[in-house]
Amino acid sequence: MASFSDLSTGLKSPDDLCEVPQQRRLSLRTRLAFGFGTIAFGIKNNGFSTVLLLFYNQVAGLPADTVGLVIALALIFDSIADPVIGHFSDQTRSRWGRRHPYMYAAALPIGLFYMLLWAPPRGDHTVTLWYLVGVALLVRTMISFYEVPNTALGAELTSDYHERTVLTGYRELFGWIGAVSMQFLLFAVLLKPAPGFPVGQLNPAGYQTYGIVAGLTMTAAILISALGTHREIAALPKLGHPLPFTAAFANMRSALRSRAFVILLLSNLLASTNNGVTFAMSVYANTYIWEMQPGAIALFTLSLLVGVAMAFVIAPLAGRRLGKRTAAVVCVVSYLSLVTIPVMARVLGVFPANTSPLLLPILLTFVAIYAGFGIAGSILFGSMLSDVVEEDQARTGRRSEGVFFAGNFFILKCAGGLGIFLTGLIITAVGFPTGARPGAVPLDVLNHLALVYSGVTLILGGAGALVLWQYPISQQNHEARVAALAGDGGAGGPQAVNI
């Protein structure tokens, strides 16, 4: 068994040897199965980022800044849970591999807790608030039990520089399919006006039905993905003895010595916080700035699928032509150049009026294009994170996929909470009324909202792109590193190296 001190020195015993993943292209079946489970994360992430604040603020009646704050505070527990899950996932040795036991275990609880999130007790706002804190925390934790091992599995399936981009593309594809399809169902079918609720977006019954359908879908997606990738367990790298739990936090500190990893974490914190603001603000913009009916908002979400399809093509092509880092920065800058144009054009009075038949087609076109660039950047980012694993293995002799992806996943959840928190602050700061009806919000409040949102987006997104430009891993040094670790001149077969 490895000792605590072995973390920095590496192990010499043959029992502590670790293989390098094969440099291989994966079958379409494996790619599809690997990506399919991300439907669950897509549903959860879209629900938290897009409608959770609206639901608990405008429907349940809690103050927007308070909802944002408590969601952000729930991340304190995640700061411990995610890295611990990553460590245990890395150190698990079973006939089902390192990742699959956690993936199977998470399936049922995720669905159940997500259903409960959208059916809070009514009447006492204090009770509702603590209910939100507790159930949101359970949802986040169980998502970690699936997502951390699943994303780590991607770095084990292949070490090929470009195949990792393709594999990450499938994760993004299915994640967005889950997010968009469930949001389409919510706005096109479930949020209908009813007696006492003339505005469909404020009808609580629609959210409860959404929670049930979404929860069942999340459970099914995780089980299908875990079963579909189960046969790959035998082809994964062979590992030596696990490290004891006493070494967990030293292992995490060691991961933070990777410059490439720290750059990715900081860049992701900035970019994903920006995305959190954008998603949370989009429902307010669609409802109050553009005064859309639920059916129009449903079409708005479908245009995201066009962007996903664009990104699925753009990311691998741009990565091959420009390298992952340059391609990702180009995608981010393109996204930032487009995402704030509609609301700023409305403030300047040069965008079609809400009654114009041109409004919806123009908005849908903008959404599809900027989403394509933004999602392509996210695909490339995920592929870059996989390459950090071999850089760390060359430095420490260990494979710690779970620790790296847990750190990134924690940042994603931090950013989501920060995004909602910032949106709540923005909404409160501009004096946006609670329980507002579309068409009744003063124009100066809407213009102030658009200006503050645009400024926050450009600052956060631009800072993230600048940080990402410092990422040091290229295709050339990655492939040389994998070849050196494999010890076979780059042929790609797994070969033991010290862990």
Image (cartoon, grey):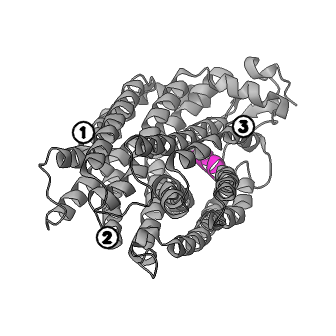
Tell me where residue 461 appears, x and y as whole percent. 37, 34
Residue 337: numbered disc: 1
Secondary element under disc 3, as helix, strand or loop, is helix
Mark 1–mark 2 distance (CA, rounded to whole Å): 27 Å
Q: Nearer the viewer, mark 2 or mark 3?
A: 2
Residue type of the residue flagged with mark 3: Ile
The magenta segment is 147-154
Badge 1 vs badge 2, beta-carbon distance below 8 Å: no
In depth, the one of 151 and 27 nearer the eye is: 151
Q: Identify the residue at image location x=52%, y=45%.
A: 65
Secondary element under disc 2, as helix, strand or loop, is loop
Residue topped by disc 2: 293
The kind of secondary structure the magenta stretch mainly shows is helix
Left or right relative to 5: residue 85: left
Q: Earlier in the sequence, mark 2 or mark 3?
A: 3
Residue type of the residue flagged with mark 2: Gln
Tell me where residue 35 appears, x and y as whole percent. 52, 57
**Pointer 1 local density, CA inside 10 Å: few below 14, some 14–19, many at least 20:** few
Q: Identify the residue at image location x=75%, y=28%.
A: 249
Q: Nearer the viewer, mark 1 or mark 2?
A: 2
Picture quarter with the N terminus: top right
Farthest-out residue, bottom = 195
**Pointer 2 local density, CA inside 10 Å: few below 14, some 14–19, many at least 20:** some
Secondary element under disc 1, as helix, strand or loop, is helix
Residue topped by disc 3: 80
Picture quarter with the C terminus: top right
Farthest-out residue, left = 350
